[in-house]
Every structure is written in C-alpha cells, then in structure tokens.
Image (cartoon, grey):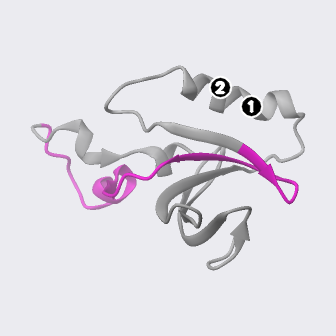
Amino acid sequence: MLLQGQTLGKYQIVAPLGSGGFGAVYLARDTWIDKQVALKVPHRQNLNFSELLHEPRLLATLDHPNIVSITTAEKQENIFFIVMEYVEGETLESVIAGGALDMQQPAARFDTRTTTG
C-alpha cells in the first residue's frame, strides 16, 4: 500500500483511486513533467519479472479510445508498477452504487480501470 505524499521513483502519490483483483491504482504526479498519471501496483509483487510484465505488454498492444494508454512499466524500490494515463471521471463502481444504470448513457463516461484491478 502506498501513502499520499510517498514517492516512487519520479512519481509522487496523490491519492488512492481503487483496488481490484490484480492490484491497487493510485493517482500520482510525474514530478519531472508535472503531469497526473495513474499507477497500477500489483498485489502480488513476488511473481517473477516476466509474469509481472504480462499485463503491461498486453496493454501496450492495444489502441482504442475506450482503453487507457500505458506509458511504461517500472520497478522502483523493489515495487513493480504500471504507469498509465489518468482519465478523470466517475468509476463504474460509484455509478452502480447510485442505483439503476441508464442504458442510453455512453459507456465511455465510465472509468472502469479502478474497478477491474
């Protein structure tokens, strides 16, 4: 678990965004270029490096407007993490908690990264 204000390489943790089966996602600031990013930190840090690289390599092959883009994958201070674009918006989890979904709303309105882990 990362804490607000903690730094991981050049990234400063701003706030937790959510957690799922794969890992936890944090809003962070790239301190070199002053840009907000999302950091996805797998729960299972004990996997071998090639297993940790499986998801970021898969994400790097995708290019679609409804899928966040990956910037890089890094290992700093023995913590492996994936750096992704940060997309501000409601999480699907918060929309579902609010009651019935309006099926006429575009799916792109939801930020599903934080609920899929």
Choose top left, top right, bottom left or bottom right for residue 63.
top left
Given contact means CB atoms under 8 Å apart, are the residues at marks 1 and 2 in contact? Answer: yes
Q: Residue at x 20, y 47 (%)?
A: 101
Q: Amino acid at mark 1?
A: Leu
Question: CA gap, disc 1 to disc 2?
Answer: 6 Å
**In this rendering, is residue 92 above or below 51?**
below
Task: Say whether residue 62 is magenta.
Answer: no
Start and end of the magenta stretch? 74-103
Callout 1: SS: loop
In the image: residue 100, left or right of residue 115: left
Q: Which residue is mark 2?
A: 57
Towards the viewer: 52 or 116: 52
Question: Where is residue 24 shown, x and y percent of the image?
Answer: 63, 55
In the current view of this chain or complex, which residue is farthest to the top? 61
In the image: residue 14, left or right of residue 77: left
In the current view of this chain or complex, which residue is farthest to the left? 104
Question: Where is residue 3 shown, x and y percent of the image?
Answer: 67, 75
In the image: residue 42, left or right of residue 48: left
Question: Where is residue 51 shown, x and y percent of the image?
Answer: 81, 29
Callout 2: SS: helix
